[in-house]
Image: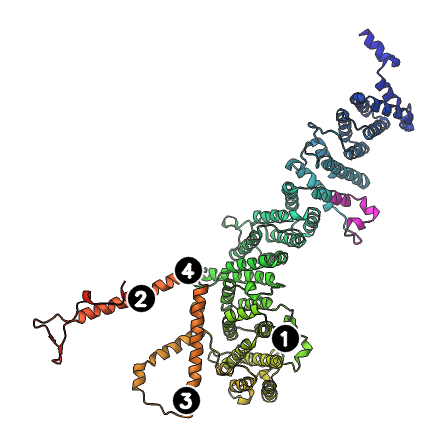
Amino acid sequence: MTLYGVCGCCGALRPRYKRLVDNIFPEDSEDGLVKTNMEKLTFYALSAPEKLDRIGAYLSERLIRDVGRHRYGYVCIAMEALDQLLMACHCQSINLFVESFLKMVAKLLESEKPNLQILGTNSFVKFANIEEDTPSYHRSYDFFVSRFSEMCHSSHDELEIRTKIRMSGIKGLQGVVRKTVNDELQANIWDPQHMDKIVPSLLFNLQHAEEAESRSPSPLQATEKEKESPTELAERCLRELLGRAAYGNIKNAIKPVLIHLDNHSLWEPKTFAIRCFKIIMYSIQPQHSHLVIQQLLGHLDANSKSAATVRAGIVEVLSEAAVIAASGSVGPTVLEVFNTLLRQLRLSIDYELTGSYDCAIVSTKIIKEHEERMFQEAVIKTTGSFASTLPTYQRSEVMLFIMSKVPLPSLHHAIDAGKAGENRNRLTQIMLLKSLLQVSTGFQCSNMLTALPSSFLDRLLSAALMEDADLRLFVLEILISFIDRHGNRPKFSTISTINDISVLKLKVDKCSRQDTVFMKKHSQQLYRHIYLTSKEESNVQPHYEALYSMLALISIELANEEVVVDLIRLVLAVQEIAQINEDNLPVYNRCALYALGAAYLNLISQLTTVPAFCQHIHEVLETRQKEAPYLLPEDVFVEKPRLTKSLDHLVPEVFFRQSKISEVLGGSGYNSDRLSTPYIPQLTDEDRLSKRKSIGETISLQVEVESRNSPEKEERAPAEEITYETLKKAIVDSVAVEEQERERRRLVVEKFQKAPFEEIAAHCGARVSLCFWHLTHRLCSAVEMTPPPSPSGTITAAYGQPQNHSVPVYEMKFPDLCVY
């Protein structure tokens, strides 16, 4: 004990490292660190690395004592000495020294003095920038993460001090990230317990930014003053953190962002949420973009019963993130993205119709219809944003997927019944077709067979037969977006009889082989639906404009000689609808059909450049201008249409004559026989499923009439006088019959090529069963009518005429095909 006391009192007997440490402190703390003595201490530490831990422990002891005595000048000197030793010593023994250093930093951070907190943070940041030669297996940064996060939320009364403390907290978190993120042996900073503190602290400082009008959008363009603000520093720190995130760490980094936005109700203004995710999407590695999208989709599902404004905010953020993700990846599960969006769309429609998110909480949550509509529009916009980032083949898959979700009254798809079911079906159909229109907008595909496969086109055209006018308009717009591959649609936005179409500067390419195959396969479908759509009484000006655009675009994009002929026949059939008026259409609809035909025939006559055809069209247009201007588009398709009260007394000269057009075009090489044949749409199953009177009823009546004119009844009819007109009519009728027979055969072949095997088997099985039933019935009748043989071997008929023996049924010989 005596020796220990002597050593403690006599300075010459103290250990050398303690004397060197004591010598760096001046008598007056204001004089600062004694640099010469500091150099001696540094040299000693480098010469004897094993003494580093003792130097650190002794410095730590002095610092703690000075803090307790409020001798803050000496505290600053001790930290400066520690910093210099850290920068100078990179030996294997530095780990033990670091423990003393971190202990001193923690002591400063625990102080209530802002200056000591800032001093400790600055020292930690310097330490974080040092690359250590050897890893540390037991070092923990939990305290520093918690303390720096707390400093980021400082609420000091003085603004300047509060700003400094928050900036120190952000710098400290940045230091922790730099120190640990790339070292697998260090504490895992990506653990949820750390991310749940770091990310909200950074977002808190981003959230409390002072919105200035002159704020630069990029950190590189920011002024020096802005670079010193907590907001800018937090943004740089967040970008650095996310830029270092690997594939498996994205989820832990994004989840705290979503929770922070939820807790602070930041989805509804959505400005801050969009800004956050723009930072995220531009900071992470591009190949990880789809992980962020999946996190947002999962969060949208989790908030499916939240307010519509919250869900709309999430969807808006999704839309912005999808555009940025285009340069990277939207992930392998593309259809899951659209499935989630469509599911949310249907849920929103249910909420709008029922008025509640859940039957049990009707009284606590009130749904506002306009907010749900806003959410639905946001989903539709987001669907288009996602689709615009996809390659062509994936967009085709997405369109097929969306179309498969549209409820349609078909042979294989049931729809909801009842009034509520009808409302739900209608809203669902409208929203899904809107989504499909968003996806198809800007879709470019050189092969129409690829762009419009049969499975897609059949369902899309089925929607064109619906009673709802909005649905039909959406279908037309979708078809137009597919067909218009050269951007000609805006040039046909208004219906007019322009004298010279060269002013439109149309982009016209020769019809490709793939387009020709497409039209041979699907042209009759398209014509039929155009014909039926034009007959609808609920059509308004946008419907006729869409029909005109569709006819014009088919003529430019997909037309060959045969297509031109069929389109002319179709338009003349539309003129006949207005002329005969079997459907009792209003005057406006009839005038609109006349005007539509005039505008299209004026266009096609100039495209075909046949002088006689152009002359006939021009003559009819001039006659209408003089006698019936209400049959021209310039008088019909205006804000206040100039119509007549009756169309019953129109002169023949105002109509386009099929015989004349057939004659003039036949002379130029077009198929005059086909031109002279009136267009009759085909009967399909869709007509039988339609709720309104359709062409199917008309055709079925025609079939019934023809069945009555059987050969037996024709025999009783008086002989018809054979004249030249009769022979001519017979030739024309035979051509029409041959055409119909050829079309029927084509449909049969196409059905066996396209229909599923199960459907063909069921159809053939039904026919075989029916034939077998008829055969059995006839055989049974024949057996019943056959009398038993007489004893003499002959039987006598009613008129006394002898008949031969009847052969028993079991001895009859039938062809093999008749035996079951």
Q: Position of residue 820 (x, y in %)?
A: 27, 62
The verdict on residue 213 being magenta is yes
Q: Which tag is nearer the camera, tag 1 or tag 3?
A: 3
Tell me the tag on residue 620. none
Left or right, 142 with respect to 345, comes to right
Query: What's the distance in space between the residues labelled 4 and 1, CA to CA?
Result: 46 Å
* Local secondary structure at mark 2: helix
Left or right, 5 with respect to 385, comes to right
Question: Residue 269, can we see it?
Answer: no
Left or right, 357 with respect to 269, comes to left
**Three-letter code for the amino acid on which mark 1 is drawn:** Thr
Disc 2 marks which residue?
770
Mark found first going from the N terminus, 1 or 2: 1
On the image, which quarter does residue 8 sit in?
A: top right
Q: Position of residue 378 (x, y in %)?
A: 61, 57
* Local secondary structure at mark 1: loop
* Local secondary structure at mark 3: helix
On the image, which quarter does residue 481 sit in?
A: bottom right
Query: What's the distance in space between the residues labelled 3 and 4, CA to CA?
Result: 45 Å
Disc 3 marks which residue?
727
Tell me the tag on residue 494. 1
Tell me the tag on residue 757. 4
Mark found first going from the N terminus, 2 or 4: 4
